[in-house]
């Protein structure tokens, strides 16, 4: 049996960490389905995967741009890797917050005659995503409080005021500036460019939502769900 030295184990851990990050960055779009969204499960998948996609591409793209050819060297610094992972999860929550509010607004706009309580439906959808994600080990101690802020924003949203533009996408640009493990002096120089780059990434997601979302079909499934004694209390399947 081969025994690794501490140096070899440390190197292996860094290489593994680098590969994991590069894999997430390069293949972040692989899980994105272009299938029509016709039921609550499909909508949930869209919100979850697109939030993850924007979080990863925005964060890793910024780090790669800032580091240039030295990008792989970032993973020689264990504390920096810890910071990257924390930033990744906070960016996911920021993106989930923005896309959830936009999604609720699009449901209302595309199915104005539906009797479904969009607010309650979106609360359950977002909570189900957070429940599945749990509290990742590498997310840092502030993750649960941030997750609760996401839910608080969804609960407080006035859906009739949500418009089909970039106006609700405020948490993710701010999140990248706040959480990216870049020195503050450089982030101050990059601020406007970084925020605009996140907003630009969201344009594709909004186009997908417009093209793929059949709001009437999604909400019809909720309306037609069994009711009465013994029926599920959740609006999600």
Image (cartoon, helix red, strand yellow):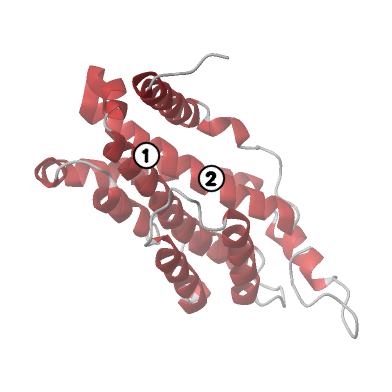
User: How far apart are the two marked residues, 1 and 2, measured between alpha carbons?
Assistant: 12 Å
On residue 58, the disc is 1
On residue 50, the disc is 2
Label 1 CA crowd tier, 10 Å (few <14, some 14–19, many 20+): many
- Left or right of 62 on screen, residue 215: right
**Residue 206 in view:** no
Q: From the viewer's side, name the closer residue of 119 and 137.
A: 137
The percent position of residue 149, horizontal first and vertical second, equals 42, 70
Q: From the viewer's side, name the closer residue of 87 and 82.
A: 82
Quadrant, the C terminus: bottom right
Secondary structure beneath label 1? helix
- Left or right of 114 on screen, residue 89: left
Residue ID at (39%, 50%): 91
On screen, 166 above or below 207?
below
**Residue 121 in view:** yes
Image label count: 2
Q: From the viewer's side, name the closer residue of 191 and 26.
A: 26
The percent position of residue 112, horizontal first and vertical second, equals 64, 71
Q: From the viewer's side, name the closer residue of 135 and 89.
A: 135
- Left or right of 137 on screen, residue 109: right
On screen, 231 above or below 209?
below
Quadrant, the N terminus: top right
The percent position of residue 92, horizontal first and vertical second, equals 45, 50
- Left or right of 2 on screen, residue 168: left
Label 2 CA crowd tier, 10 Å (few <14, some 14–19, many 20+): many
Residue ID at (25%, 53%): 178
Secondary structure beneath label 2? helix
């Amino acid at each position: 049996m081969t025994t690794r030295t501490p140096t070899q184990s440390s190197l292996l851990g860094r290489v593994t960490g680098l590969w994991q990050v590069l894999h997430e960055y390069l293949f972040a779009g692989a899980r994105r389905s272009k299938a029509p969204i016709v039921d609550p499960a499909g909508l949930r998948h869209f919100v979850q995967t697109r939030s993850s996609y924007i979080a990863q591409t925005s964060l890793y793209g910024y780090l790669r741009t800032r580091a240039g050819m030295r990008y792989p060297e970032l993973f020689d610094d264990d504390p920096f890797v810890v910071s990257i992972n924390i930033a990744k999860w906070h960016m996911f929550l920021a993106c989930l917050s923005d896309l959830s509010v936009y999604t609720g607004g699009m449901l209302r706009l595309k199915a104005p005659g539906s009797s479904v309580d969009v607010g309650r439906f979106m609360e359950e959808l977002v909570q189900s995503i957070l429940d599945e994600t749990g509290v990742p080990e590498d997310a840092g101690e502030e993750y649960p409080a941030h997750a609760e802020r996401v839910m608080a924003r969804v609960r407080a949203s006035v859906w009739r005021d949500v418009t089909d533009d970039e106006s609700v996408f405020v948490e993710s640009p701010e999140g990248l500036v706040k959480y990216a493990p870049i020195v503050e002096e450089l982030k101050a120089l990059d601020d406007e460019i970084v925020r605009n780059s996140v907003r630009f990434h969201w344009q594709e997601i909004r186009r997908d939502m417009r093209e793929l979302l059949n709001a009437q079909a999604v909400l019809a499934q909720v309306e037609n769900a069994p009711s009465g004694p013994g029926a599920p209390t959740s609006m999600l399947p």
